[in-house]
Amino acid sequence: AQSVTQLDSQVPVFEEAPVELRCNYSSSVSVYLFWYVQYPNQGLQLLLKYLSGSTLVESINGFEAEFNKSQTSFHLRKPSVHISDTAEYFCAVSEGYSTLTFGKGTMLLVSP
Amino acid sequence: GAVVSQHPSRVICKSGTSVKIECRSLDFQATTMFWYRQFPKQSLMLMATSNEGSKATYEQGVEKDKFLINHASLTLSTLTVTSAHPEDSSFYICSALGPSYEQYFGPGTRLTVT
């Protein structure tokens, strides 16, 4: 069975500071990895994904995540955050084209 | 592309009544859709996998007679909460499996049972 651990339930940062949201997973087979963002009272939006190839994946709004197989991690980073990045971030894993397993989420709180 | 809608976005119903939530893939066909439930400040919990033209597959602990799922077409899946109780109040989110095997999520439905 697969599982996802997001160690931080909440991460407060100041605007323009760098941030890292941690995600570790466990699985017995190869996996696909995802980061989703959820704004209040909204559904989930895909931020970025790792399926294969380059272990460093980027989103259009400056986030990036690196797949580290040896550490079973897929941490999300942004070098400089904005107030508008305040949201809940979910890491998720799937084994092939199957159901997603989500972490508990990390609330990113960006203050001026 | 790959837009998924849900209707209604919010619904309030009285205890004991039933409520139906629709999930539509607007610009692609989805043979598989998923229904999730999200409690406040918690993650999404998969309730069931809905396959077009066949019975849904429910996760352990989800009452199939209470949460009726119908996937009658390639663009529509419905979730009916029967005999709703206050503890069924939650945020329900659907997703549809797109052509690239990626899940596209709907905006969610906030159900409040009074």
Image (cartoon, grey):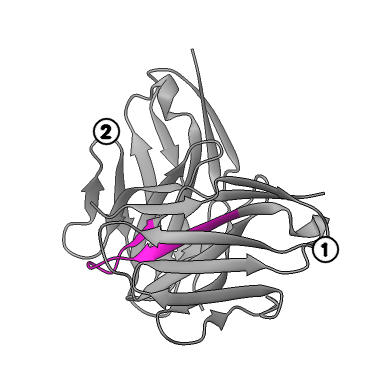
Q: Residues within 10 Å of mark 1 (few under 14, many from 20)?
A: some
Callout 1: residue from which chain? B
State the mark number for residue B89.
none
Residue plotted at (38% across, 25% down):
A81
Q: Point out the stretch of residues depicted in magenta.
A: B92-104
Percent x, y for residue B82?
72, 69
Residue plotted at (65% across, 45% down):
B41
Evaluate whether residue A70 shows in this view.
no
Main structural element of the magenta stretch: helix, strand or loop? strand
**Figure disc tally:** 2
Percent x, y for residue B42?
64, 51
Looking at the rendered structure, the secondary structure element under dot 2 is: loop
For the residue pair B48 and A28, the one nearer the viewer reads as B48
Q: Are marks 2 and 1 in contact (CB under 8 Å)?
A: no
Residue matched to label 2: A62
- Residue A100 shown left or right of residue B40 in the figure: left
Percent x, y for residue A69?
33, 65
Labels 2, 1: front one? 1
Give the farthest residue toward the bottom: B54
- Residue B86 shown left or right of residue A101 in the figure: right
Q: Relative to residue B13, is residue B19 depicted above or below?
A: below
Q: Residues within 10 Å of mark 2 (few under 14, many from 20)?
A: few
Identity of the amino acid at label 2? Gly
Looking at the rendered structure, the secondary structure element under dot 1 is: loop
Image quarter of residue B86: bottom right
State the mark number for residue B16.
1
Residue plotted at (41% across, 85% down):
B53
